[in-house]
Amino acid sequence: MKYLLAYCIPLVALIGIHFGGIWTYSGILFAFVLLPILELLLPIDEENYTDIEKESRLKNHLFDFLLYINVLIVYGSLFFVLIFATQSGFTKLETIGVILSLGVILGSNGINVAHELGHREKLYERILGKLLLIPSHYTHFFIEHNHGHHLHVSTPEDPSTAKYNQSLYRFWIQTVLGTYRKAWQIQLRLNQQENRSFISIKNDMFWFTIIQVVYLILIYVFFGIIGLVIALLAGIVGFLLLETINYIEHYGLKRNLLPSGRYERVSEKHSWNSNHVLGRIMLYELTRHSDHHFKSQKKYQILEYHQVSPQLPYGYPMSMLLSLVPPLWFALMNKRIPLDMKP
């Protein structure tokens, strides 16, 4: 039941937006001021589950329902904000707060949950994952992440892996443009391999493009230019939060090139891990990212900690803040990169 705390971000953000004024910033302040402070005070949990516990957790479908509910939360939050904006109106400062707070919801309860569901085998779970990507304008993430990132992580071929001494801002340009371009490359290759028509029902990138355009058109039709601006910019905040997480998850780590010309296999060493409890709960164990890349089909409730995995000195919320200041981030992280991975 601890994962119910993941709903705190949308709850706090929506209450703040309802009250207006400085309270519209509640979502961003909760996520990036209060949570980092609490993580500094709370103990780190390195415990793994026993085989019996893992079997029990896999059989408990409540863990899945906790993810599914986020579809209602994300779209409910979006429409609440857009209706409130068109009926009540916001000042310029309030609008900025609304965009930031809504963006946090789209990132934490939207893209993050979509990432988990995108790895599932059941069709309806993957569909729910795709639905959660629409408000952040990042449906192509489904293609590139599953067919590109997990294959090429920690190599120069992966636009979602941050290089040694690469700033977050340069990384944003690399990954936002690179993942979209690579998603199309992957899709066209899949089309060719399976002899599909470009407008085939299985050409996800074609339909993703149509869906994203229709989504923005409908927002404009029903909520006007103000609604469109809020939805557009909040979505951008959402996917930039995702890419900031990508930045801290793989910064400076690389797989070595073998004499055969191929890269070594992905292991627990090729992602940064964090055992800080609040980040684990709020992001459905995304912070145990090393194990996720080691065994990508494992569900979030049984992800494990590996001692060989490089460890972030702080939790995800604090690490994301520190990454905004490149000299500080480099000073903190460069010395922690394993020697065999440094350039």
Image (spheres, grey):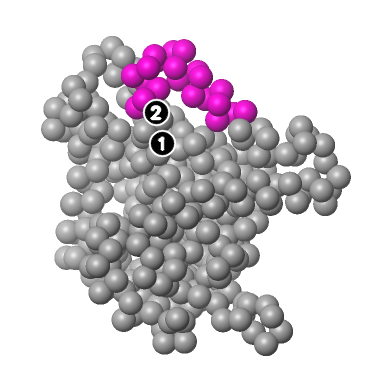
Q: Does the magenta-highlighted stretch encompass residue 165?
A: no
- Residue in the picture at 65% in, 56% down: 147
For the residue carrying disc 1, how many other residues have a C-alpha within 10 Å: few (<14), some (14-19), or many (20+)?
many
Provide residue 235's location: percent of width, then percent of height: 41, 36
Residue 249 showing in the rendered view = no
Residue located at (48% from left, 78% from top): 269
Where is 14 relative to 174, above or below? Answer: above
Q: Is residue 294 left or right of residue 332?
A: right
Farthest left residue? 22
For mark 2, what is the residue?
A: 231
Horizontal and vertical percent for residue 207?
66, 33
Q: Which residues are drawn in magenta?
A: 210-231
Compared across the picture, whether 12 is left or right of 240 comes to left
**Residue found 50% across the figure and 18% down from its top:** 218
Q: Which mark is residue 235?
A: 1
Tell me whether circle 2 and circle 1 mark residues in contact (CB < 8 Å): yes
- Amino acid type assigned to the residue bearing label 2 in the image: Ala
In the structure shown, which secondary structural element does the residue marked by tag 2 occupy? Answer: helix
Observer able to see residue 195: yes
Residue drawn at x 47%, y 87% is 340
Label 2 neighbour load within 10 Å: few <14, some 14-19, many 20+: many
Identify the element where label 1 is drawn. Answer: helix
**Quadrant the C terminus occupies:** bottom left
Question: Which of the 4 image quarters holds residue 124?
Answer: top right
In the rendered view, does 309 fall on the left or right side of 24? right
Q: CA distance from mark 2 to mark 1?
A: 6 Å
Describe residue 116's horizontal placement relative to residue 13 as left or right: right
* Amino acid bearing label 1: Gly
